[in-house]
């Protein structure tokens, strides 16, 4: 890993560690994130089978891992942010889930060092892998981690987000087209700066070896409904929000709508 890569990795870990104490509260108070998370969970449950073992990347404070463990699945959760892991570890003990969840501090760039056996599912939610400088380098590590027939489900932020592009009508071109920068966008969280990279479904498909993986589906999140940073929209315009969500559910798996979104879900099966 280059010095630049190491700096990026450390900055991301520092930023999310600083936010760890309030992360759950921010998440809980955002109805847009709540809906998106339910969509991801429903999708995961449609693919998982009883007894499946899951590797989660960028597990954060464990919101998804705890949900999956409470459904009866075994989760090996990883993250590289000390603060997030500290909060997560306390929750595991409080909820008596030590038999269902194992926790390890490790970066998604270093999965080759993971000595935890093979998994039925590799999962990463809400753009955690958008902090990776090379999504290809991350995906290539899955081969040794997934069992034959195993599935990788990743939730990624794509370059095209219609809601953001609408900001061009207000003259905010910097935000409207920021995702189009192929070199990534300078982001900041809790006073720490790092780079966010936006990856298209096509690039994700190409990252997986076509001889080894088969596409299950690509689904858009936030195609017509607003992105998470417009969390007040559902409260200010409940009827419009409900209508947009209903319309979105009819088109979110079809091109180009499954790639024109705030996030997209991609699931690939290892042959």
Image (spheres, helix red, strand yellow):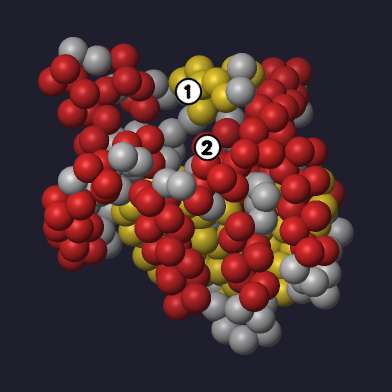
Residues at discs 2 and 1 in contact (Cβ within 8 Å): no
Residue 1, picture quadrant: top right
Q: Position of residue 113 (x, y in %)?
A: 84, 49
Q: Is residue 173 left or right of residue 84?
A: left
- Pick the residue in front: 143 or 130: 130
Residue 271, picture quadrant: bottom right
The number of callouts visible is: 2
The earlier-in-sequence mark between 2 and 1 is 2
Residue 102, can we see it? Answer: no
- Pick the residue in front: 97 or 265: 97
| Residue denoted by label 2 | 130
Q: Residue at x 42, y 46 (%)?
A: 30
Q: Residue at x 79, y 38 (%)?
A: 82
Residue 191, can we see it? Answer: yes
Residue 91 vertical position relative to residue 126 in the rendered view, above or below: below
Q: Position of residue 142 (x, y in %)?
A: 65, 57
Of all residues, the one furthest to the bottom in this rendering is: 50
- Pick the residue in front: 226 or 4: 226
Q: Label 1 neighbourhood size at 10 Å, few (<14), some (14-19), many (20+)?
A: some
Q: Secondary structure at mark 1?
A: loop
- Pick the residue in front: 159 or 103: 103
Of all residues, the one furthest to the front in this rendering is: 236
Gap between marks 2 and 1 measured at Cα: 9 Å
Q: Which mark is residue 201?
A: none
| Residue denoted by label 1 | 184
Q: Residue at x 69, y 29 (%)?
A: 18
Q: Position of residue 102 (x, y in %)?
A: 81, 63
Q: Position of residue 254 (x, y in %)?
A: 22, 60
Q: Residue at x 27, y 23 (%)?
A: 176
Residue 119 vertical position relative to residue 184 in the rendered view, above or below: below
Q: Secondary structure at mark 2?
A: helix
Q: Is residue 72 left or right of residue 271?
A: right
């Amino acid at each position: 890993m280059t010095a630049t890569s190491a700096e990026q990795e450390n900055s991301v870990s520092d930023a999310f560690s600083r936010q760890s104490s309030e992360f759950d509260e921010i998440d809980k108070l955002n109805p847009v994130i709540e809906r998106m998370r339910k969509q991801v969970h429903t999708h995961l449950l449609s693919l998982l089978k009883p007894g499946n073992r899951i590797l989660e990347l960028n597990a954060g404070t464990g919101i998804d891992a705890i949900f999956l463990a409470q459904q009866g699945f075994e989760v090996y959760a990883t993250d590289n942010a000390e603060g997030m892991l500290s909060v997560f570890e306390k929750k595991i003990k409080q909820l008596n889930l030590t038999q269902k969840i194992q926790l390890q501090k490790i970066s998604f760039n270093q999965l080759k060092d993971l000595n935890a056996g093979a998994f039925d599912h590799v999962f990463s939610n809400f753009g955690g892998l958008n902090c990776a400088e090379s999504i290809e380098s991350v995906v290539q590590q899955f081969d040794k981690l997934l069992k034959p027939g195993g599935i990788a489900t990743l939730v990624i932020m794509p370059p095209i987000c219609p809601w953001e592009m609408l900001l061009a009508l207000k003259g905010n071109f910097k935000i409207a087209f920021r995702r189009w920068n192929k070199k990534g966008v300078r982001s900041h969280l809790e006073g720490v700066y790092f780079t966010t990279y936006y990856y298209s479904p096509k690039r994700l498909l190409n990252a997986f070896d076509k001889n080894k993986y088969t596409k299950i589906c690509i689904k858009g999140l936030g195609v017509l409904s607003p992105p998470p940073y417009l969390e007040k929209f559902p409260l200010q315009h409940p009827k419009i929000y409900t209508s947009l969500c209903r319309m979105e559910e009819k088109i979110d798996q079809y091109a180009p709508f499954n790639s024109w979104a705030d996030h997209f879900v991609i699931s690939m099966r290892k042959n």
